[in-house]
């Protein structure tokens, strides 16, 4: 066996097996022992708080006690004799400790050689490790976990999710509390595997051990071949079938079956998920089925066979084996079993439960025994065995004693010197072994146990704990253990008073310890009577205080220190059965509600105190008198123990009222107002009792209730009040006329209610329906379906709490006490006029109260009787009527609307005579009528008053009650909810009728118009009870419409074009709401208010109530959002109100006729995050992109303020969408559109870049928003339009600043200048922008856009772009780069160019050379410069003549030709592919290579532009000249040229974002000469056509990255391998180049008709690019159906093998249908379903259809549950929408995904959390996978990268420290250390850098030392 390192020994030292003295001795602090002290005694550990005794582990005794115990132990165990000198004794102890640690602290395996160990293997909390397999017994079954008793007294926990294998599909989280108890039983033996150790904030020896019962972990490594007949296996019941049970072993390779015909199956019924043990009877290897038998006797006697080659992985705890004794140890045996394995048995697992001192004599060498495996440690191959007789029978030992039991005559069996006593407890029916630790023998120090106790003597012992697996009790002999009322948790009872010591104080409360060591919690609210801000100051750790136990649940005890509770002498209420009527006790308030308080007592008992029993004064709020946590004395009024309900009262001795004072419910009383509060009115009843009238109960009408309350003053007397309920001594009263008037009919009990009767009541609650209250607490319930006739209305909007209602009883259930009612108006309509009568009566009372306050006279009302004729003067004429003033009354005015003028032409100052129709005493206004039929009723006008009374009496005599009469509407008062009627048949008598009723007060009212005829019934004649009014009841209230109203509506029909007189009912920013005719409503759109140009706020001169003349122009569109609010579209434009014949033409629908560039005006109706929406007309909308509104960042930031709703905006049309009738506008004119950029008048709004040339041109200044800050010197990606982005080159950010990116961030608004706009080959537009707005002269001088602007010796500025070992590249401008050789970087030596010239650094240098043709520029940064005549001569093109034959070397090979360096010069010429050979050249790359020597003829020389055209055709040289073939022959001069150009690759500086290799625009002269080159000038290669659904932002980002990588790669030296790879890549891309050329030709000469497209398609049937362009063309013509047909045709035409092309068409088809229809699902049948789903998901997310995207994701997670990408998309969707539920998705994904994808999924989810979620959740995910895979350096690197990106330096450093503390090989740790060093170099200082270097050096030394030792 390999020697264990000292680190492992220290880590797994045997510590923690002795009991914690802090839990045994009262208030004694725990003493930490020196690590060197090692006990040689027997020890064990018990569970939880139960003490243990040493078994070779560390002890909790003091140092002095340890020394004494060791002195005694040496004699028995043969130790060295220690001298009395302390120093020598310590040295001797240290020497003796090392072997003890090796023997007892760590586990040893079966490879024992040499000296045998002294002690048997045992497991402790120090050496338990994950992966260890242990046998245990279930001790407790809780709701969410199982408690397992393990060997050595350890305690393990099994979560509910770890009790079953996932393949059983058992949802443990949703199971009830009895689920685990149905599946498992206490005392059941189970095999477990250790998952984890929870050692955080735990004391030594008291760690939590998390276990798993999953068979997939226990049987890991099992195969069907390894299973033999006769083996005992454990399995889960997976399902129950007719003939047996299907079993699961947690492995997918085989299953089990247990037949029901087995005779043992009749004992008990099995459930799914239950663990079974069975013997293998037979194996069907073909079907992979194992047949078991669960016979208990067979299972218990089955012995594992000795199979050759068996591995330790096949050993399972609980297996029975045949073994033989190898040797005896000091505390156990060593056994050999199964030939290859050895194991140990400790002394507490022997056959005899009471081993004496001579136990070793019973186990001779080679003695054969039967044993069961107790535990296995695969890492050390250590095995523990047991010989326990109960365990050998496969049964747990019986638990015959309980904790706390006392036995007076226990017999001592064995005395272990220095350790403890083995005792035999006389339990029934058999004795139980117990062990007493030496620390529990006596209260004082125990010395020389063998002298104090003799074997066979009797002692008094108390059971302190129990080890269930060994059947061993833990005892205590201390005298203090028998004293006191509390010894264990079971002794603690709720309500008892205890003394305790404070151990710790925290924000949640205090941890206290009782005298027996039992711990309890005192919650923060219970630490004092009042709230404590700083509990640590009031409660000192170590103080002893008195507490009272609140409750005991399991082993959790809570106590209180509230003074009132602790010192209370009242009875304790700890159960519902103890709550007897009249019991007075103390409790504390836990919750305060409006209707009462909740009070809690001991042991969780709770009661309720109703508001009436709180003892509050009327009108006082509960929260102002009581507070949560307050201790109160209360009395039990009633209780229902079965229902766990207790009713309480704070009135301990309630006052008994006399018989005279008793007021019964439903009685009528009078009351005097005592006080008016915000909640209601307090009145004094019968001079003694007090009552409360809530505000809602002052009136039946909601508006009158508040008026009445404001008018009430103390002292006012209510004549009639109805007693509704009582709250203690307080009465609940109502003044509602409806309830007072029907007090005799109101029910008090359910027996008084009869079905189908109508009962008056009021609404008391509106939750899930309407609750109607009557008298007392009698309540009826009205479901939503029975509340309103029109189910479209919401109940909460139709009723209010306190509303008076009429209810129809539908059902009465006497058993349940439930009453079901209906509130529908159709069945509960009023049959009298009490509703309007109560209004007039209360109005009269309010008027009298107000007049009493103002001391106004009421005489004026006597002269303005209803129907009387009065004389007045026209005071003012208004649009809606005339105002009349009266000579005698200056403050009283009359009003007569136009309808009541009777056609009279009145002028201001005219004296008129009018009839009084209505009087408003509150407003002092009289409604008058000047109609002749009213005024001329009397023959003699001089005697008005007598005749009035006479005529009135005559009319009254003719009118009879309940008579049906015809009436005419005179005045409609919608605010007061009634109208004034006249009865023409009865001398125009005036009557009044209500517009609404009790149950429909908040519902829309029926509309009436002046002059309308109605039918009514006379319900009340004029009398004082009606305030002198004739009251009528309309038949139309609650019933069908009357025939007269139908005729009125029929006569009032309108047609389009009719002129109407309409009244303004509402004015909104964008429309007027009008009403006209009989119940007709219309609107005037803002564009229909004025003619010509739109005016600002055209409604500003209008007001509500004004009458307008309008013309009906159309019917309302039913598909409009608010079409129900108006039936007609009206216009008040002056041109529409004329009577000319042109009106008919104007009413015809106007064609959608707009043109690009046309100026239109609209009104703002909505502003969102990206668009300003305008309404141009009723049917045409427009939108302005937010970046088109301004170019100033400040104005773009305040978009909402700049464009308010209703503002008039003028713009110019940029694009038109006829189908949606939508325009896109821009604020600046389009008059400067270039001639070459013709716009299409009809186009889709989605394709917004088609007219980009109309809007954006070179030199334009536009507004933009930064979308992405590109890495390195990539610059910025700026959004300048919808789906249109421009790139700001690094050199265009600022005018030569050291850090151009400083001050720019994503989302920032910027002002941009357009430098260049050019189309790309992918159907998009590339825009170059600049942010440089400095001095124009300076800016132009510094800007170098063309290579012609550069001259040698010119001073230039640039930014470092990339650094290579041979130099660096700098960006001079967006189109020009330059190279600087390493030798030209500085005058001196540069050790590290990367450090001296980081990417992005601003440098200033001098131009050395400029090669115009190849666009190569070389710059030097040296301070000393000079250019000789030789260089100028070498760069002079004047020496070259057309026709000369030159020689040179190929500099670069491109797809369009060769660049050739001319010998003895620095000039480079271009030989086009058409001039290479007289024959066609198929592959230029395969024929020519860079560096080859060639000869060529000069065809053309351009001295101004430094361009040279060459030719290599044979015809150029003639017959006598041989064409030089490519060769490798070189001369000295050639070698010199080669060296000069070596490593200097020509880099394309085109400045474009596309990753291409096209020639620059400066080569345009050569391009124009060669037509073929013109076809491929845009780029030399193109990516495969993709219909991408990703954001353009990400696409540009990818291109920018590839663009940067391209330039960096060019600068590197290419070896032969990379050249061959590039050559192979070029061949593969040849076909793509041809396709790209075709597509560019197609773009340049775009077909203009369907016929032209058909011609192109016939030549490219399999090209998805052409088909999609064809579809886009049809969409531009608004022919959606044709576009669909083209898509279907393309899918049928494209070859089936062209999967990518088909998928492109499908994605385009999906986009089409998403915009104009429903996406087809047939794509799933022809394409990869996963790709189609992902494409559809991207489409939904791009168009922000989040609901559809979420539904699709739910389907995808079910259909593709094994796809990591799908689950990541689900997580990403949640994070982008800022929704919760990520953890639930992760849990589902982990259960669904294969295990090998878990790391990828969790790590990617963590990265998403860091980027767009909650970083703490991301950390949790990383921590979780690192706990399982702590040595995965790739995970550490990802984790570190995310923390570095987040920027928290302290958090990152802490993570680095954790990473470098791992035990890894040096080669794995080296990258982490380097990353740490780079991090500190970036953010740290020199001290931190040195620290990391030192740590790396120490790690290297340590690691190298370990590796050498190994």
Image (spheres, helix red, strand yellow):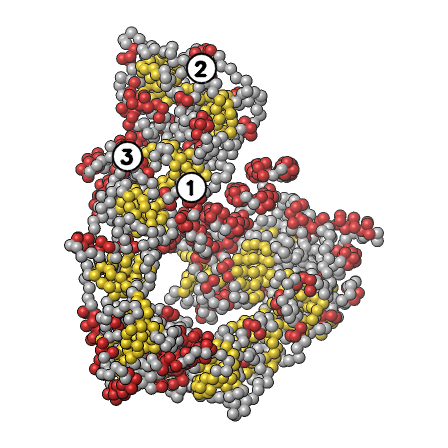
Residue 1194 seen anywhere in this rendered image of the structure: yes
Between 880 and 503, the one nearer to me in the picture: 880
Residue at screen point 31% across, 14% down: 1499
Q: Residues within 10 Å of mark 2 (few under 14, many from 20)?
A: many
Which disc number belongs to residue 1664? none
Residue underneath mark 1:
1192
For the residue carrying disc 1, how many other residues have a C-alpha within 10 Å: few (<14), some (14-19), or many (20+)? Answer: some
Q: Which of 1422/153 is in front?
A: 1422
Instruction: State the residue in front, 280 or 154.
Output: 154
Residue 662 as seen in the image, left or right of residue 952? right
Q: Where in the figure is residue 1126, as x and y percent of width and height?
A: 27, 62
Instruction: Indicate the quadrant containing the C terminus: top left, top right, bottom left or bottom right.
Output: top right
Q: Earlier in the sequence, mark 1 or mark 3?
A: 1
Instruction: State which mark lies toward you, 1 or 3.
Output: 1
25 sits to left or right of 1593: right
> Which sits earlier in the primary sequence, circle 2 or circle 1?
1
Q: Residue furthest top?
A: 1520
Closest to the camera, between mark 3 and mark 2, is 3
Q: Nearer the viewer, mark 2 or mark 1?
A: 1
Give the alpha-carbon distance from disc 3 to disc 2, as whole Å.
48 Å
According to the image, label 3 marks what residue? 1237
Q: CA distance from mark 2 to mark 1?
A: 54 Å
Q: Are marks 2 and 1 in contact (CB under 8 Å)?
A: no
Q: Is residue 1132 above or below residue 1495?
A: below
Where does label 2 land, which residue?
1537
- Residue 1710 appears left or right of 336: left
**Secondary structure of the residue carrying numbered label 1:** loop
Q: Nearer the viewer, residue 510 or 996?
A: 996
């Amino acid at each position: 066996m390999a020697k264990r390192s000292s680190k492992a020994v220290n880590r797994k030292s045997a510590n923690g097996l002795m009991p914690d003295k802090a839990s045994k001795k009262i208030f004694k602090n725990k003493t930490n022992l020196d690590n060197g002290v090692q006990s040689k005694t027997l020890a064990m550990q018990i569970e939880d708080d139960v003490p243990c005794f040493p078994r070779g582990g560390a002890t909790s005794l003091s140092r002095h006690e340890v020394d004494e115990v060791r002195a005694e132990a040496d004699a028995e165990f043969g130790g060295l004799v220690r001298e009395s000198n302390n120093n020598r004794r310590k040295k001797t102890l240290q020497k003796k400790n090392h072997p003890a640690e090796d023997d007892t602290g760590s586990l040893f395996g079966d490879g024992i050689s040499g000296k045998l160990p002294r002690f048997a293997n045992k497991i402790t909390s120090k050496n338990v490790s994950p992966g260890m397999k242990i046998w245990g017994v279930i001790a407790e079954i809780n709701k969410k976990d199982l408690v397992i008793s393990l060997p050595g007294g350890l305690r393990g926990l099994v979560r509910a999710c770890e009790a079953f294998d996932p393949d059983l599909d058992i949802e443990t989280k949703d199971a009830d509390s009895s689920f685990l108890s149905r599946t498992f039983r206490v005392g059941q033996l189970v095999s477990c595997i250790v998952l984890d150790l929870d050692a955080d904030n735990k004391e030594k020896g008291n760690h939590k051990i998390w276990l798993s019962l999953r068979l997939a972990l226990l049987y890991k490594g099992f195969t069907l071949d390894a299973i033999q007949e006769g083996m005992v296996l454990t399995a889960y019941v997976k399902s129950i079938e007719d003939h047996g049970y299907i079993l699961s072993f947690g492995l997918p390779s085989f299953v089990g079956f247990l037949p029901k015909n087995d005779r043992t199956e009749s004992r008990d019924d099995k459930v799914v998920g239950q663990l079974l043990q069975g013997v293998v009877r037979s194996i069907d290897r073909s079907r992979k089925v194992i047949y078991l038998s669960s016979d208990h006797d067979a299972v218990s006697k089955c012995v594992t066979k000795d199979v050759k080659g068996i591995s330790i992985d096949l050993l399972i705890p609980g297996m029975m084996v045949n073994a033989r004794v190898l040797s005896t140890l000091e505390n156990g045996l060593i056994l050999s079993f199964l030939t290859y394995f050895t194991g140990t048995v400790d002394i507490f697992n022997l056959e005899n439960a009471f081993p004496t001192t001579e136990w070793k004599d019973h186990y001779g060498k080679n003695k054969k025994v039967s044993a069961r495996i107790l535990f296995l440690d695969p890492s050390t191959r250590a095995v523990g065995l047991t010989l326990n007789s109960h365990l050998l029978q496969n049964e747990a030992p019986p638990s015959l004693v309980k904790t706390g039991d006392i036995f007076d005559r226990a017999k001592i069996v064995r005395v272990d010197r220095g350790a403890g006593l083995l005792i035999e407890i006389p339990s029934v029916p058999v004795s139980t072994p117990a062990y007493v630790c030496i620390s529990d023998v006596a209260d004082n120090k125990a010395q020389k146990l063998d002298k104090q106790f003799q074997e066979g003597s009797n002692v008094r012992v108390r059971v302190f704990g129990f080890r269930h697996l060994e059947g061993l009790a833990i005892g205590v002999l201390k005298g203090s253990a028998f004293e006191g009322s509390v010894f264990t948790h079971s002794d603690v009872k709720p309500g008892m008073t205890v003394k305790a010591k404070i151990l710790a104080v925290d924000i949640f409360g205090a941890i206290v310890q009782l005298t027996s060591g039992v711990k309890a919690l005192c919650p923060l609210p219970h630490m004092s009577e009042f709230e404590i801000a700083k509990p640590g100051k009031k409660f000192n750790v170590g103080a002893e205080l008195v507490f009272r136990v609140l409750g005991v649940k399991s082993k959790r005890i809570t106590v209180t220190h509230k003074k009132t509770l602790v010192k209370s002498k009242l009875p304790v209420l700890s159960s519902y059965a103890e709550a007897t009527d009249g019991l007075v006790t103390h409790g504390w308030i836990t919750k305060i509600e409006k209707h009462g308080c909740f009070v809690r007592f001991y042991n969780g008992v709770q009661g309720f105190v109703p508001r009436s029993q709180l003892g509050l004064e009327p009108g006082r709020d509960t929260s102002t008198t009581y507070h949560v946590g307050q201790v109160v004395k209360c009395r039990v009024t009633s209780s229902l123990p079965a229902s766990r309900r207790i009713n309480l009262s704070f009135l301990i001795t309630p006052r008994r009222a006399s018989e005279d004072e008793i007021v019964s419910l439903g009685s009528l009383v009078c009351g005097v107002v005592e006080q008016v509060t915000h909640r209601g009115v307090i009145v004094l009843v019968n001079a003694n009792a007090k009552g409360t009238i809530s505000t809602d109960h002052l009136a039946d009408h909601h508006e009158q209730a508040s008026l009445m309350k404001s008018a009430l003053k103390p002292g006012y007397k209510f004549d009639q009040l109805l007693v509704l309920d009582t709250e203690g001594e307080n009465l609940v009263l109502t003044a509602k006329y409806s309830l007072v008037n029907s007090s005799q009919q109101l029910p008090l009990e359910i027996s008084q209610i009869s079905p189908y009767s109508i009962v008056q009541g009021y609404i008391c609650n509106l939750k899930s329906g309407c609750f109607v209250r009557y008298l007392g607490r009698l309540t009826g319930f009205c479901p939503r379906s029975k509340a309103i006739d029109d189910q479209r209305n919401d109940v909460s909007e139709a009723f209010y709490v306190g509303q008076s209602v009429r209810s129809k009883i539908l059902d009465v259930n006497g058993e349940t006490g439930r009453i079901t009612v209906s509130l529908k108006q159709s069945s509960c309509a009023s049959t009298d006029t009490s509703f309007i009568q109560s209004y007039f009566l209360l109005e009269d009372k309010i008027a009298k109260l107000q007049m009493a306050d103002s001391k106004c006279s009421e005489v004026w009302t006597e002269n303005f009787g209803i129907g009387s004729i009065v004389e007045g003067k026209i005071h003012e004429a208004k649009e809606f009527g005339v105002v009349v003033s009266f000579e005698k009354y200056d403050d009283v005015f009359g009003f007569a609307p136009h309808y009541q003028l009777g056609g009279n032409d009145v002028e201001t100052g005219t004296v008129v005579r009018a009839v009084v129709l209505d009087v408003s005493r509150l407003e002092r206004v009289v409604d008058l009528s000047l109609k002749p039929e009213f005024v001329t009723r009397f023959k003699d006008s001089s005697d008005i008053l007598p005749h009035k009374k006479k005529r009135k009496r005559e009319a009254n005599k003719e009118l009879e009650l309940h008579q049906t009469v015809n009436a005419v509407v005179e005045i409609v008062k919608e605010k007061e909810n009634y109208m004034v009627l006249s009865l023409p048949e009865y001398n125009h008598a005036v009557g009044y009728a209500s517009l609404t009723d009790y149950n429909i007060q908040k519902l829309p009212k029926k509309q009436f118009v002046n002059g309308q005829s109605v039918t009514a019934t006379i319900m009340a004649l004029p009398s004082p009870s009606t305030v002198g009014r004739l009251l009528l009841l309309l038949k139309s209230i609650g019933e069908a419409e009357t025939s007269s109203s139908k005729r009125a509506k029929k006569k009032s029909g309108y047609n389009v074009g009719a002129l109407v007189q309409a009244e303004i009912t509402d004015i909104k920013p964008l429309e007027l709401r009008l009403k006209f005719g009989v119940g007709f409503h219309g609107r005037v759109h803002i564009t229909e208010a004025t003619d010509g140009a739109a005016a600002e706020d055209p409604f500003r001169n209008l007001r509500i109530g004004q009458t307008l003349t309008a013309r009906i122009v159309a019917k309302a569109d039913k598909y409009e959002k608010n079409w129900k609010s108006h039936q007609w579209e009206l216009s008040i434009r002056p041109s529409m109100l004329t009577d000319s014949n042109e009106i008919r033409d104007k009413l015809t629908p106007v064609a959608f006729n707009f043109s690009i560039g046309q100026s239109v005006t609209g009104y703002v109706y909505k502003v969102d995050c990206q668009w300003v929406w305008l309404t141009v007309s009723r049917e045409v909308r427009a939108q302005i992109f937010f970046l088109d509104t301004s170019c100033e960042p400040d104005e773009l930031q305040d978009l909402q303020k700049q464009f308010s709703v209703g503002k008039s905006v003028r713009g110019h049309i940029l694009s038109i969408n006829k189908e949606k009738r939508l325009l896109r506008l821009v604020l600046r004119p389009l008059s400067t559109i270039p001639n070459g950029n013709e716009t299409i008048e009809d186009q889709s709004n989605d394709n917004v870049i088609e007219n980009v040339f109309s809007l954006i041109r070179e030199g334009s200044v536009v507004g933009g928003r930064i979308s992405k800050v590109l890495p390195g010197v990539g610059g910025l990606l700026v959004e300048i339009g919808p789906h249109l982005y421009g790139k700001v080159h690094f050199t265009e950010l600022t005018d030569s600043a050291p850090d151009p990116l400083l001050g720019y961030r994503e989302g920032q608004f910027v002002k941009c200048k357009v430098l260049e706009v050019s189309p790309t080959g992918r159907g998009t537009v590339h825009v170059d922008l600049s942010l440089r707005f400095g001095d124009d002269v300076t800016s132009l001088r510094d800007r170098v856009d063309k290579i012609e602007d550069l001259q040698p010796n010119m001073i230039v500025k640039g930014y470092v772009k990339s650094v290579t070992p041979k130099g660096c590249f700098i960006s001079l401008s967006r189109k020009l780069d330059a190279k600087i050789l390493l030798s030209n970087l500085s005058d001196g030596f540069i050790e590290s160019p990367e450090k001296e010239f980081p990417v992005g650094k601003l440098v200033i240098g001098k131009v050395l050379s400029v090669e115009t043709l190849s666009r190569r520029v070389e710059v030097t940064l040296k301070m000393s410069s000079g250019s000789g005549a030789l260089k100028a001569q070498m760069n002079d093109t004047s020496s070259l003549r057309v026709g000369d034959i030159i020689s040179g070397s190929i500099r670069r090979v491109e797809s369009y030709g060769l660049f050739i360096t001319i010998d003895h010069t620095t000039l480079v010429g271009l030989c086009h592919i058409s001039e290479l050979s007289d024959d066609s050249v198929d592959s230029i790359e395969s024929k020519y290579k860079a560096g080859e020597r060639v000869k060529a003829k000069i065809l053309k020389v351009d001295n101004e532009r430094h361009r040279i055209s060459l030719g290599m055709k044979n015809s150029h040289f003639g017959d006598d000249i041989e064409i030089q073939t490519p060769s490798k022959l070189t001369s000295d001069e050639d070698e010199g040229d080669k060296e000069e150009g070596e490593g200097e690759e020509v880099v394309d500086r085109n400045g474009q974002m596309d990753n291409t290799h096209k020639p620059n625009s400066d080569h345009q002269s050569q391009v124009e000469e060669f037509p073929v080159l013109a076809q491929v000038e845009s780029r030399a290669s193109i990516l495969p056509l993709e219909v991408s659904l990703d954001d353009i932002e990400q696409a540009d980002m990818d291109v920018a990255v590839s663009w940067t990588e391209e330039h960096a790669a060019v600068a590197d030296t290419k070896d032969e391998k990379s050249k061959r790879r590039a050559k192979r890549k070029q061949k593969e891309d040849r076909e793509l180049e041809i396709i790209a050329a075709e597509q560019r030709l197609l773009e340049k000469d775009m077909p203009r008709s369907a016929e032209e497209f058909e011609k192109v398609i016939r030549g490219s049937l399999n090209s998805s690019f052409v088909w999609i362009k064809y579809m886009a063309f049809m969409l531009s013509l608004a022919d959606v159906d044709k576009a669909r047909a083209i898509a279907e045709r393309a899918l049928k035409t494209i070859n089936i093998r062209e999967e990518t092309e088909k998928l492109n068409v499908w994605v385009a088809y999906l986009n089409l249908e998403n915009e104009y229809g429903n996406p087809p699902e047939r794509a799933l049948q022809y394409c990869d379903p996963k790709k189609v789903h992902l494409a559809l998901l991207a489409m939904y997310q791009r168009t922000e259809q989040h609901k559809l995207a979420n539904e699709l994701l739910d389907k995808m997670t079910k259909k593709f549950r094994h796809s990591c990408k799908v689950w990541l998309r689900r997580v990403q969707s949640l994070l982008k929408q800022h929704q919760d539920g990520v953890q639930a998705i992760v849990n589902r994904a982990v259960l669904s995904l294969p295990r090998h994808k878990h790391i990828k999924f969790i790590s990617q989810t963590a990265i998403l959390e860091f980027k767009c979620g909650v970083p703490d959740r991301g950390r949790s995910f990383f921590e979780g996978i690192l706990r399982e895979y702590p040595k995965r350096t790739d995970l550490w690197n990802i984790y570190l990268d995310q923390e570095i990106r987040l920027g928290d330096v302290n958090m990152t450093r802490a993570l680095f420290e954790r990473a470098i503390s791992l035990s890894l090989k040096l080669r794995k740790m080296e990258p982490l250390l380097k990353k740490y060093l780079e991090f500190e170099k970036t953010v740290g200082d020199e001290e931190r850098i040195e620290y990391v270097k030192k740590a790396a050096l120490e790690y290297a030394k340590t690691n190298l030392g370990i590796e050498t030792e190994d």
